[in-house]
Amino acid sequence: MINVVAIATQFRNELLVMNARAMDDLTNRWRMVEAALKAEIEALAFQMSQAKAEGQTVSESQLYANDRYHALLVQLQRELAKYNADAAALIQAQQLSFASMGAEQATAWLRYSGAIQGSFYQLGSGAFENIAALARAGNPLADLLSAAYPATAQAITDELLKGLALGKNPRTTARNMVNDGLTTSLNHALLITRDQSVRAARLATLQQYQTSGLTTAYMRIAARQRRTCLACLALDGTVYPTNVMMPLHPQCRCAILPILRNRAPLAMSTGKEWFLEQSAKTQRDMLGPGRYGLWKQGAFQFEDLATVHSGGVWGANAQVTTVAALQRIGQ
Ligand SMILES: [Zn+2]
């Protein structure tokens, strides 16, 4: 018997390795943004620190009237636009390789499931462009990326005001503005890359199942790790028709296993069974004290840990059920 969970883990790891490379590229390219803004940020931190030393109060509204602050925001927007253009190209390329990998994994799953006897239609590279567009749910990558600008400008401003309020050395304030404020944009880009890549891979897997003509349903497999989302573990083993994407959450890494016509799905233990094998401490750590208390009282079933909301731009999403909602189930 093949170990379904081990194969799913191996496939997940292949994607993680590919992702790590893109993360490194984006982070390295980020150094150029930091370098371009460093002098301007330091000059502003020194000027404001000086103003404060001279007895002036420095507030957010006063900053808006400051030329140097304005110049920094203009430069920030320009540097982020350049960075985001590079990031968009990288994410686009990344989506295509993830889609290709997702389709390969689908083919492997079909073989493991016993479909190898028949031939089936395999997705060609032309399909991947389409999948990349679907993964963005109609949002251009540029729009997704540029959404970080207002938050980044605010984060830099907050760090500056915080540094001034605490009377920090302007050099320290400038460093915090770069490390804690400016990186808001980098983190946003990294998040989008991870999310978009995984979506593209999963969509390609699903599309490969659909076009193969061999399957009409698939089963969800969650990772079995302490940090696995509880909603995913609770939904593990759920069967969905291939014409719908299962409910996801941001950065969900659940795999999808084809169920062939007239064949039993590959055997595997469920997320619930895995959870029940864990020590009381692990269970408590994963559930948190509130849910754990209710779980021990038998106030809810394991499946109740997932709450599914339908609709939304990104499709149906799965969330971990709140303690309050679990409490209501028990009453
Ligand atoms: Zn998941």
Image: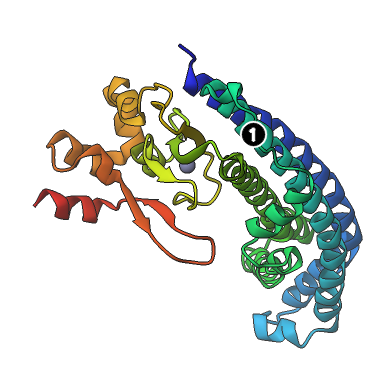
Q: Compared to 9, does 304 lie above or below?
A: below
Relative side of 228 to 205, left or right: left
Q: Nearer the viewer, residue 299 or 232?
A: 232
Instruction: Report the residue that reaches farthest toward the top.
Output: 1
Which residue is depicted at the point 60% across and 31% down? 12
Is any part of residue 90 visible from this angle?
yes
- Quarter of the image where the N terminus is located: top left
> In the image as oriented, which residue stretches furthest toward the front?
118
| Image quadrant assignment for residue 33 | bottom right
Residue 104: x, y in percent?
A: 68, 32
Provide residue 86's location: percent of width, then percent of height: 86, 56
Which residue position holds label 1? 120
Based on the displayed image, in which of its 4 quarters is residue 7 positioned?
top right
Q: Quadrant of residue 297?
A: top left
Percent position (x, y) of residue 165?
A: 62, 68
What residue type is disc 1 on?
Answer: Phe
User: Does residue 9 show up?
Assistant: no
Residue toward you, 268 or 54:
268
In-front residue for pair 112/223: 112
Residue 105, given in percent of the width and then of the height, sits at: 63, 31
Would you say 121 lies left or right of 34 here? left
Vertical arrangement, residue 130 with respect to residue 13, above or below: below
Q: Say if 255 sits above or below 161 in the image.
A: above
Say whether mark 1 is within 8 Å of ligand 1: no
Q: As displayed, is residue 18 above or below residue 26?
A: above
Residues 74 and 328: in front is: 328
Q: What residue is at 16 percent from the left and 34 percent from the top?
A: 296
Residue at 82%, 72% (x, y): give it. Answer: 77
- SS class of the residue under badge 1? loop
- Which color mode does the image show? rainbow
